[in-house]
Image: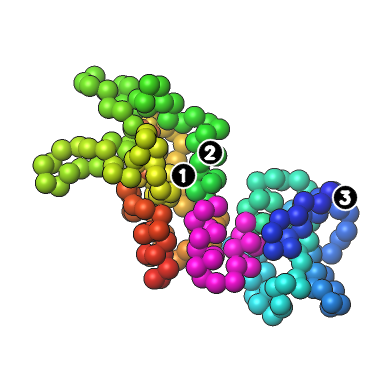
Amino acid sequence: MVKNETKNNVIVVTKNDGKSVIDLNLQDKVYLMIDINNITNLKKLIKKIESITKEYDKDKFSLLIKSNGNKKLENDVMECINAALCKTKKEKIEYIYDTVCNYLDEEFKNNNYCDFKDDVCKAKRKCKDKKVTMGCCHEIKSLLKGKLKECPLLKDKKCSTKCITCKLFTCDAIEKKFKIKDIPLIDIYFNPIQKFIIKTSYFTKREVIIDKLLKW
Ligand code: SF4
Ligand code: SF4
């Protein structure tokens, strides 16, 4: 038996031959065993877990996740459960926001999608005219003069905030697309207006986007 613990008392149990799908053991602690090997609808499972967990004191609650080792699925389930166990709406939105940003940062870092060389990205290298530096961060328009200029949030060649909308974007030069329906944390927990905010808030500070999400 292999165990990995995360926050909120979630324990992933792999290589476990136990047969039970959900067992509640009502002693001083509550244990919930979930078999994720044959999940067809993650949204339904998370809603079910959420409704069960509402009945118990979260500090006395532990989840055992039975898995056959599908790391992506284990991770998706654990993140969704962590979100379900957040105590306030603000905590939940911030957890989802930061977790998705971290996931996107890792994806871009590991796959080098934009392939920057001398501050010029893969897409801009193809332009015949002057090579624009800093990729998408150079595309904000000045309404006064109608010119392109760098986003004011770009500092020392780095984004000074965590703009989830910018992070989700890939241009035509990159085949990979990040769709909201493929990111369980957003797909399951955000309503249509929150999803719209996530899709449209380019060039915006993290705190501003979080404030907007909190209103809905
Ligand atoms: S998404 Fe496209 S335009 Fe934006 S930085 Fe990456 S390669 Fe450049
Ligand atoms: S907010 Fe977007 S455009 Fe502005 S610096 Fe950050 S990633 Fe670039």
In the rendered structure, are the residues bearing label 1 and label 2 in contact, judged by CB atoms less than 8 Å apart?
yes
Whether the residue under disc 2 has CB within 8 Å of ligand 1: no
Residue at mark 1: 178
Q: Residue at x 20, y 43 (%)?
A: 141
Q: Is residue 2 above or below residue 135?
A: below
Q: Nearer the viewer, residue 144 or 66?
A: 144
The picture quadrant where one finds residue 17 is: bottom right
Q: Earlier in the sequence, mark 1 or mark 2?
A: 2
Circle 1: is it few (<14), some (14-19), or many (20+) Cα within 10 Å? Answer: few
Relative to 135, is 7 on the left or the right?
A: right
Residue 48 makes an appearance in the image: no
* Earlier residue among tags 3 and 2: 3
- Please report whichever mark, 3 or 1, sits nearer to the chain's N-terminal start: 3
Residue 145 left/right relative to 96: left
Query: Which residue is denoted by mark 2 in the rendering?
Result: 107
**Magenta stretch, residue numbers:** 79-99
Mark 2 belongs to which amino acid?
A: Glu
Tell me: residue 44, above or below residue 110: below
Asked if the stretch drawn in magenta spans residue 81, the answer is yes
Local secondary structure at mark 3: loop
